[in-house]
Amino acid sequence: MRTERDSMGEMSVPDDALYGASTQRAVLNFPISGRPLPATFIRGLGLVKWACARANAELGLLPVEKSALIEQVALAIAAGELTAHFPIDCFQTGSATSTNMNANEVIANRASQLSGQPLGSRRPLHPHDDVNLGQSSNDVIPTALHVSVALALHEQLLPALVAMGATLEAKAEAWSEVVKIGRTHLMDATPLTVGQEFSGYAVQLAKSAARTRQAIAALGELAIGGTAVGTGLNTHPEFGARVARALTERTGLPFREAANHFEAQGARDDCVAVAGHLATIAASLTKIANDVRWLGSGPRAGLAELQLPATQPGSSIMPGKVNPVMSEMLVQVCLYVHGLTQTVQLAGREGQFELNTTLPLLAHCLHEAIHCLTNGGRVFHERCLVGLEVDREQCRRQVERSLMLVTALNPLLGYDQAAALAKEAHTTGRSLREVVLEKKLLDAATLDRALDARRMTQPSERAPTHDAG
């Protein structure tokens, strides 16, 4: 152990730790979950510290040699090289001041190492006066929250959704001629093609990708430049805009200084909006995962229209049983994400006056939701959707057995007579065709045309209305 000092006095710190006294106090004060803030958030914080140093150098407020050191270490944090030196629990002070100081101390101590100075010497960088110059935890942490979540959405979730959507589009095209029976209320309905069904899933993914882009856009405004309460005390008037510009150039995402710093620090409405998009994406993925496992149920006593890839044995007692484990995994992920996004919505209400004091929890929940949605979606895509096959013969049999083809007889015979025919066919176990021909209600050619399931899937090919007399 070595001894470091902060404004409250001396503190023993592990010899190999790059953090200092303030961080060690927080480690001791918050032994709550054992989970530090997400590495993706810490990397975003590194980018913010890099941009702040660059802006201060541009403004002539920080010597170039000090800025260069801060930028070097901050980029190492952004690259994930120093994440082990950020041990503070995610349940900590609501402003995450402890984590901001953690970054300041790591940067200062690593700069000491690089300069041949002892750890804790505050040479050549002071954690407050140099690394935190022109900043407050109250604007740095909300900025890091927006930057890190936007990057996670852009680099992780968006590519996963786009890839999944492309596979679903390909399946829709490949199965565009396979006619199957539709289902509403879990009961037989009129026919459609498997391609049409999967085109709906593909559009859900396209909309999910669009919602992800909307979420990224919602995070574009940054609180940096507001310092403690939004007034910008102790920072240069151009500081916030310069930091935002540097972050945009570095990441390629459209960041900008907040139009109103009091909103940007006192409220977390943008995070609530992002949570709403994530909840919607989770709902979409749940619908698809559930449909896939229902349509693949069987193999002999279920719907069995889809053949799911076999990934592992399904039972410890029933030999040969294979379960839809990828769908089950994704449904659980989405349930978890709904809980996380609900927490974000509740945390968003906790802004009192000039600051929301649930920032670490917001960071944890948003990054966790994105991480799990990304990995859950990616694995479901790779180990289920890609290898998914359709049982064409089973689809054909289901169509032929369905009584809902009678719907096509409505324009020819009227609803009441068609309903009676369906009831009689169901009661007697005969086909609709047999019952209609027996009663001589339609000739065979007209009936075959009307009951052509393929034509029913194409509105332009529907049979014309016929007066049955």
Image (tube, helix red, strand yellow):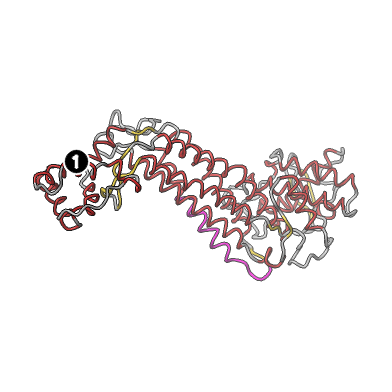
Answer left or right for 437 relative to 184.
left
**Please, is residue 217 above or below residue 401 in the view?**
below
Q: Position of residue 360 (x, y in %)?
A: 62, 55
Q: Nearer the viewer, residue 345 or 408?
A: 408
Choose top left, top right, bottom left or bottom right for residue 435: top left
Answer left or right for 163 relative to 46.
left
**Please, is residue 392 above or below residue 127 in the view?**
above
Answer left or right for 284 relative to 468.
right
Choose top left, top right, bottom left or bottom right for residue 6: bottom right
The quadrant of the image that shows the C terminus is: bottom left
Q: Nearer the viewer, residue 226 or 397?
A: 397
Residue at the bottom extreme, as displayed: 353
Q: Residue at point 78% right, 57% down?
A: 241
Residue 453 lies within the magenta run: no
Residue 348 lies within the magenta run: yes
Residue holding disc 1:
445
Q: Position of residue 452 (x, y in %)?
A: 25, 41
Q: Position of residue 453 (x, y in %)?
A: 27, 42
Q: Which residues are magenta?
A: 335-354
Q: Nearer the viewer, residue 309 or 109?
A: 309
What is the three-letter code of the residue carrying label 1? Ala
Q: Secondary structure at mark 1?
A: helix
Q: Residue at point 64% right, 45% down?
A: 40
Q: Nearer the viewer, residue 34 or 410?
A: 410
The quadrant of the image that shows the N terminus is: top right
Residue at the top extreme, as displayed: 320
Q: Residues within 10 Å of mark 1 (few under 14, many from 20)?
A: few
Answer left or right for 406 relative to 109.
left
How would you classify the magenta stretch by its main secondary structure? helix
Q: Position of residue 150 (x, y in %)?
A: 64, 50
